[in-house]
Amino acid sequence: QVQLVESGGGLVQAGESLRLSCAASGTIFSFHVMGWYRQAPGKQRELVATITSSGGTNYANSVKGRFTISRASAKNTVNLQMNSLKPEDAAVYYCNLNWWAGGSRRDYWGQGTQVTVSS
C-alpha cells in the first residue's frame, strides 16, 4: 500500500513563496516519477512539475523559473519550492507518484493541499 502525505500549503500574497512537501511510504518501485499537479476550481488537473528517481525534472511552462522541484534527503520525499507566486497559481496541489509495471502505469495520489494567493 502506497501512501502520500503532503504538507506546506497555505495563504500567501502575490510575490511571496511557499514550499510544499510530499512523503511517500510503502512499497515503491525503484524507477518512478514523483511530482505535483494542481487543480483550480472549474479547471482540469494539470501538471506542475515532476522529478524522476534519477533526478530528471520537468516543469509546466507557466511555472518555469519560479518553481523548483527537488528530492529531499529523506527517502521518497520531494519538495516543491514556489517563488514569485501569482494569483493564477492558486489551486489544490496534489502529489503524484507513478511508475510503469507490466505494461501499465500505476498512479498514486495525495489528498491535496490548498494554495491560495491573494493579489
Image (cartoon, rainbow, N blue to C red):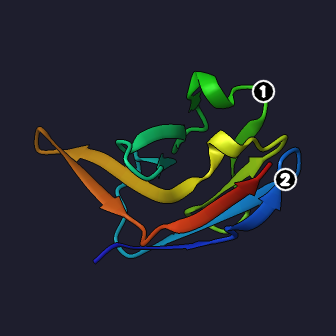
Q: Position of residue 48 (x, y in %)?
A: 54, 39
Q: CA distance from mark 2 to mark 1?
A: 13 Å
* Furthest residue in direction right, as rendered: 16
Which kind of residue does numbered mark 1 sit on?
A: Gly
Task: Name which residue lies at 55% across and 54% down.
Answer: 91
The numbered dot on residue 17 is 2
Q: Position of residue 76 (x, y in %)?
A: 55, 63
Mark 2 vs 1, N-terminal side:
2
The numbered dot on residue 65 is 1
The numbered dot on residue 36 is none
Taking the image as drawn, is residue 72 in sight? Answer: no
Q: Is residue 30 left or right of residue 11?
A: left
Front: mark 2 or 1: 2
**Residue count near mark 2 (Cα–Cα under 10 Å), binned few <14, some 14–19, many ≥20:** some
Quadrant in which the N terminus appears? bottom left
* Furthest residue in direction front, as rendered: 119
Which kind of residue does numbered mark 2 sit on?
A: Ser
**Residue count near mark 1 (Cα–Cα under 10 Å), binned few <14, some 14–19, many ≥20:** few
